[in-house]
DNA sequence: ACGTGGCATGGGG
DNA sequence: CCCCCATGCCACG
């Protein structure tokens, strides 16, 4: 986002109060922009993450702490507690701050007066957020918004009439989500021609400029109304437009979140109008036809009546009409998380498994007709219109949404998706999801690697879940969301489902069509990895004994109750010989010693150290030296330790570890999830924030960059080494166990075999770990595979390649470091072995064997993930889960070569 | 000759 | 038998 310019603009408009504690919101865009300090005037930390959206459309840059508070909905209660504007939810009585931009979307103004907190609002089908303002303040003024309008939002708006916020209940209802699919707007946005598209920029600019003025002059609402009345809609800010779009036809185009936005006000109008007619002419899609007659009115009426209820649209279609295979599997929660904005509701629209063609170089993604007609703006002409879509990383893509006449029908396609697909490193078989950010109406695109996808849902049929929690890693946006949200529960859920779904899965999605697509094993591997990783972080609820289930060769621990996403810990033995576990504080990153059987929440801080009151504060030093820590830390530690050696000290280590953990968590969640928080990832690695020094981010593009020396201790090399160790271990075991088979298997065997064979790494862990480890191993392999696959196998991931770990390892070395790598690997392997021995002795007895394993695995994963990410860069980013990253450990080495 | 765009074909549901 | 949609193929630039 053009932050700078916007910021400037907004600044002007907003004027001056940068620092009100109370009004955090609008205040200091200027300061924000200019300084490095946290946007929150009460905070002196440096900004590092994105917070709420400013009126300028930019985001408030917050420090981690403030960002977290914001993400968790605690910002106002933390900083605005003494500010005016606190009101009680009419429904639940919960206190909600209504006096600043930060909380804009945390409540809804009720028709009858008063406010309802967002959660109650949703329950009661009320709008999710304040219709009137949010847009203005919360949405970026530009194209995004304009484009963003999704049909839904649009319709909603329309329904509400002048008063935007009154909406069709269904809209908010999560369940309604799918159903809500609106019919499309009667109008089309197509008109955008290439030329028009680019006008968008100017438009934006204009908007920005205008925005302040309008805003200042009157209440947003009035302005909006005026605008509407005057026919200025085009000029209106996106938000405004959104709000009033319902009123105007114009809106339609924008609403779709389409790119149309670019059109200037006048343009837009023209377009819209023109489009309207034009649209209709063409063979109308079902919806179009339906709505065709009543344009504007139709819209309104739709909103209230049909849209909500009658309309077959989305809802109807949603699931009933759309083939199950296109049913979105992510849950609202997921979506929400993806959105990054707690107040935003992401409505899953549909998802599609990429076909070879889709993932090919042609850059055309064939859209399921019904989905296209239901969720995308109606287009009457083959040229269609540009559609703006935001990916999970917050990156915006503009695709040409168009169709080809086909027989008597149409074939809808999204053109220009190649960059996006490549960026996400998607391949045939991976799933692309489309959803819409409810308040904003923005189209969001996520993805799920085949493996993960399979887990959650590939099959519609399968997914009983429907709404369920499939989620895996939808890439969907996920910037911050995941990080914020305590995913544990969620994740656990996913995992569980995944397990169950896995069985079914295989056959699913691709189905007949997918024959070609079946990527297979790779994906499978990935999934497994994912699972593994996830498993690593999952802790069984206390006192729950798992039953082991073997699915497709994989062992799963099944717990009646959803597992808990626990904080990875390291099991060890204290001086006295007691088995204990070490855990790292979320806040200070210090390591604390805890009883062996303690199950910690995913976010654990020193304050939670009820076992050692003396060390229940972050201010207390950790009773563990960096060296000890180094020794203590398993594989993942390697990285850390090396880092230490490299130069930095404990702090670095700690950070690194923390990062790993975080990554691991994130990974599990899914791609977008984690890093997204920052919303704007690096170009290189969207998941990572700017300034991120992780391997991924510091890595040169694959195939580029200087080679590393054997003695190189950079993260990448460390990762690679670690990776190698793991691989080595695996091999070792395999060989010992299956010498003859191993060789052949490695090359031929699919991931499955690998899984079975999995080496020892997991051995350390308890019983539970067993499966995970295997998976892990597999995952690693898979990781490698992806990269290689790309290079070698092309559309169909090279199953073979992936499977062959050894080769990869070899490959790896050549790719990045060549000779040096081997040494590193050996070294790493040695260390690794040592570690394992150590750990194994400790971990075995541990009740929650999982812990040991999991922690290890998690760490490892995390570490590998990080590393991989670095190596993979793009790929890793895209991959929803860390696994991919992990897998790439070996790959990472090779990756560079890619 | 290559890359793209658009249409046609044909398997599958 | 019809509709979808993944690909193939061809024409155009």
Image (tube, coloured by chain):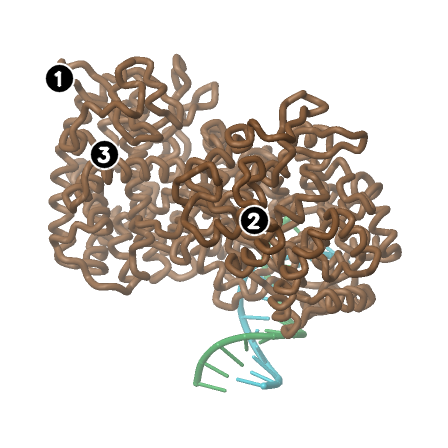
Chain colours: A brown, B green, C cyan
Residue A449 percent across, percent down from the top left:
45, 48
Asked whether the viewer can see residue A4, the reply is: yes
Position of the C terminus of chain A by quadrant: bottom left
Marks 3 and 1, how far apart in space?
Answer: 25 Å
Residue A12 percent across, percent down from the top left:
59, 56
Residue A894 percent across, percent down from the top left:
26, 56
Counting other residues with Cα less than 10 Å from the Cα at mark 1, is it few (<14), some (14-19), or many (20 or more)? few
Query: As rendered, which of A342 and A114 lies closer to the eye?
Result: A114
Q: Is residue A429 left or right of residue A545?
A: right
Q: Is residue A487 left or right of residue A317?
A: left
Identify the disc placed on residue A219: none
- For the point 38% across and 23% down, the residue is A539
- For the point 28% across and 38% down, the residue is A655
Query: As rendered, which of A193 and A215 lies closer to the eye?
Result: A215
Q: Which residue is mark 2?
A: A433
Q: Is residue A709 left or right of residue A13?
A: left
Give the number of the mark in front: 2 or 1: 1
Asked whether the viewer can see residue A452, the reply is: no
Tell me which corner region of the image, top left, top right, bottom left or bottom right, holds residue A467: top right
Asked if the residues shown at circle 3 and circle 1 are in contact, with their CB atoms under 8 angstroms apart, the answer is no
Q: Which residue is mark 3?
A: A761
SS class, disc 3: helix
Give the number of the mark in front: 2 or 3: 2
Q: Which residue is mark 1?
A: A575
Counting other residues with Cα less than 10 Å from the Cα at mark 2, is it few (<14), some (14-19), or many (20 or more)? many
């Amino acid at each position: 986002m053009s932050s700078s310019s916007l910021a400037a603009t907004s600044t002007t408009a907003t004027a001056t109060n940068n620092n009100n504690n109370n009004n955090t919101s609008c205040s200091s865009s200027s300061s924000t922009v200019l300084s490095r300090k946290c946007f929150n005037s009460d905070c002196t930390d440096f900004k590092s993450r994105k917070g709420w959206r400013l009126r300028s459309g930019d985001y408030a840059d917050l420090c981690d702490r403030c960002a977290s508070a914001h993400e968790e909905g605690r910002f106002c209660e933390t900083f605005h507690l003494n500010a005016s504007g606190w009101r009680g939810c009419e429904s639940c009585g919960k206190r909600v701050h209504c006096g600043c931009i930060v909380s804009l979307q945390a409540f809804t103004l009720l028709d009858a007066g008063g406010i309802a907190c967002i959660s109650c609002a949703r329950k009661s089908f009320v709008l999710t957020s304040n219709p009137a303002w949010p847009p203005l303040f919360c949405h970026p003024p530009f194209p995004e918004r304009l484009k963003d309008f999704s049909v839904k939002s649009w319709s909603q708006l329309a329904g509400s009439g002048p008063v935007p916020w009154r909406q069709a209940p269904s809209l908010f209802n999560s369940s309604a989500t799918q159903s809500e699919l609106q019919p499309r707007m009667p109008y089309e946005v197509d008109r955008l021609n290439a030329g028009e598209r680019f006008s968008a920029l100017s438009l934006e600019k204009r908007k920005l400029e205008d925005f302040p003025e309008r805003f200042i002059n009157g209440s947003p609402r009035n302005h909006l109304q005026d605008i509407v009345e005057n026919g200025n809609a085009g000029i209106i800010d996106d938000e405004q437009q959104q709000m009033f779009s319902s009123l105007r036809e114009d809106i339609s185009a924008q609403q779709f979140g389409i790119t149309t936005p670019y059109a200037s006000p006048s343009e837009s109008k023209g377009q819209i109008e023109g489009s309207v007619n034009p649209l209709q002419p063409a063979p109308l899609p079902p919806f179009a036809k339906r709505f065709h007659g009543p344009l504007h009115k139709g819209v309104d009426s739709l909103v209230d009546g049909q849209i909500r209820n009658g309309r077959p649209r989305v809802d109807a279609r949603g699931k009933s009409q759309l083939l199950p295979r296109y049913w979105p599997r992510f849950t609202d929660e997921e979506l929400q998380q993806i959105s990054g904005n707690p107040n935003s509701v992401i409505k899953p629209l549909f998802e599609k498994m990429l076909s070879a063609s889709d993932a090919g170089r042609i850059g055309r993604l064939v859209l399921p007709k019904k989905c296209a007609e239901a969720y995308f703006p109606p287009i009457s002409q083959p040229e269609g219109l540009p559609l703006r879509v935001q990916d999970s990383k917050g990156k915006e893509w503009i695709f040409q949404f168009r169709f080809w006449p086909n027989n008597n029908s149409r074939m809808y396609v999204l053109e220009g998706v190649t960059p996006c697909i490549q960026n996400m490193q998607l391949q045939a078989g991976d799933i692309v999801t489309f959803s819409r950010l409810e308040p904003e109406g923005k189209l969001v695109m996520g993805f799920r690697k085949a493996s993960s996808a399979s887990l959650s849902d590939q099959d519609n049929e399968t997914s009983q879940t429907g709404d369920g929690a499939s989620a895996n890693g939808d890439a969907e946006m996920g910037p911050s969301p995941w990080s914020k949200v305590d995913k544990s529960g969620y994740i656990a859920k996913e995992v569980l489902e995944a397990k169950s779904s896995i069985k079914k899965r295989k056959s699913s999605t691709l189905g007949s069509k997918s024959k070609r697509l079946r990527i297979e094993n790779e994906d499978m591997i990935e999934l497994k990895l994912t699972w593994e990783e996830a498993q690593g972080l999952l802790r069984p609820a206390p006192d729950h004994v798992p039953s082991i289930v073997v699915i497709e060769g994989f062992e799963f621990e099944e717990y009646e109750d959803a597992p808990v996403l626990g904080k990875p810990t390291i099991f060890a033995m204290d001086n006295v010989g007691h088995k204990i576990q070490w855990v790292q504080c979320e806040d200070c990153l210090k390591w604390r010693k805890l009883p062996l059987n303690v199950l910690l929440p995913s976010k654990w801080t020193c304050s939670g150290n009820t076992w050692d009151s003396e060390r229940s504060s972050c201010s207390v030093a950790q009773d563990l030296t960096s060296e000890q820590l180094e020794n203590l830390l398993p594989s993942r530690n390697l990285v850390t330790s090396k880092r230490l050696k490299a130069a930095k000290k404990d702090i670095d280590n700690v950070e690194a570890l923390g990062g790993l953990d975080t990554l691991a968590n994130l990974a599990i969640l899914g791609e977008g999830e984690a890093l997204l928080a920052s919303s704007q990832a690096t170009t290189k690695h969207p998941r990572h924030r700017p300034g991120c020094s992780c391997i991924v981010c510091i890595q040169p593009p694959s195939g580029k960059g200087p080679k590393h020396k054997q003695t190189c201790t950079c993260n990448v090399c460390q990762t690679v080494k670690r990776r190698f160790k793991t691989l080595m271990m695996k091999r070792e075991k395999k060989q010992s166990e299956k010498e003859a088979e191993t060789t052949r298997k490695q090359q031929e065997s699919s991931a499955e075999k690998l899984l079975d064979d999995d080496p020892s790494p997991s051995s350390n862990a308890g019983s539970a770990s067993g499966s995970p480890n295997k998976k892990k191993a597999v995952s690693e392999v898979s990781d490698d595979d992806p990269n290689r696959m790309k290079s070698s196998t092309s559309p169909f991931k090279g199953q073979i390649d992936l499977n062959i770990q050894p080769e990869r390892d070899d490959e790896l070395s050549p790719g990045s470091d060549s000779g040096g790598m081997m040494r590193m690997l050996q070294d790493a392997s040695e260390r690794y072995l040592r570690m394992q021995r150590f750990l194994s002795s400790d971990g075995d007895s541990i009740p929650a064997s999982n812990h040991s394993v999991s922690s290890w695995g998690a760490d490892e994963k995390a570490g590998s993930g990080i590393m991989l990410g670095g190596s993979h860069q793009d790929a890793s980013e895209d991959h929803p889960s860390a696994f991919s990253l992990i897998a790439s450990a070996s790959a990472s080495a090779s990756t560079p070569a890619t």
